[in-house]
Image: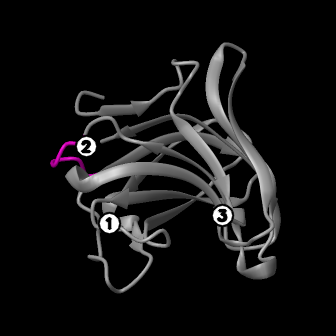
Amino acid sequence: MADTTLIDDFSDKTGPWRFFTDQVMGGVSTGEGRVTTENGRRFLHLTGSVSTENRGGFIQARRDLDTPLPSAATGVRITVRGDGQSYFLHLRTRGTVLPWQYYQAEFQAGPAWRDITLPFSAFKASGRLLPATPKPDRVESVALVAYGRDHQADVSLAQIEAV
């Protein structure tokens, strides 16, 4: 498509994605997020055990953006596959200063690679102190997240771009 801004296609082996879990706040979820290659396609593979025990409930891989997204962007398109469960994309902006603040959009990750477009209007604020919808030029990071319920997570992200 003509009007897209690539955020990541995992062509850089040392991609700047950071993996972490709810253990940063006392939770017990475990897992890993790593960039891997299969059939010539590079992607981020997020796997693990999500547990809501001890007030936890997430694993995630996050990438800080090198440059702001275009202010005219209307959403984010992802290329994903997974185990048929629900997963989330989280956005953090200049206004999400507290660790528990973010914008969240849910998607289903089936077994075949597919493109999903998530309009910015689909991202819900994690609290009432945030504006209802994130502004694209204020987005500072994106995250692939398994969240909110006890389950085994297995989701892969091959590309992410602003549209």
- Percent position (x, y) of residue 124? 41, 72
Magenta stretch: includes residue 71: yes
Q: Which residue is mark 3?
A: 24
Q: Looking at the picture, which amino acid does disc 2 mark?
A: Leu
Asked which secondary structure carries label 2, the reply is loop
Q: On the rendered structure, is 82 left or right of 152?
A: left
Q: Which residue is mark 1?
A: 121
Does residue 39 appear in the picture of this structure?
A: yes
Q: Looking at the picture, which amino acid does disc 3 mark?
A: Val
Asked which secondary structure carries label 3, the reply is helix
Residue at horizontal 36 percent and vertical 40 percent from the top:
65
Q: Which residue is mark 2?
A: 69
- Percent position (x, y) of residue 9? 49, 26
Q: How many marks?
A: 3
Position of residue 122 relative to residue 110, above or below, is below
* Residue depth check, mark 3 versus mark 2: number of the one nearer the observer: 3
Instruction: Calculate the distance from the C-alpha at mark 3 to the C-alpha at mark 2.
Output: 28 Å
Q: Quadrant of residue 128?
A: bottom left
Magenta stretch: includes residue 147: no
Q: Earlier in the sequence, mark 3 or mark 2?
A: 3
Instruction: Calculate the distance from the C-alpha at mark 1 to the C-alpha at mark 3.
Output: 29 Å
Q: On the rendered structure, is 163 left or right of 113?
A: left
Q: On the rendered structure, is 87 left or right of 91?
A: right
Position of residue 160 relative to residue 150, above or below, is above
* Residue depth check, mark 2 versus mark 1: number of the one nearer the observer: 2
The front one of 18 and 118 is 18
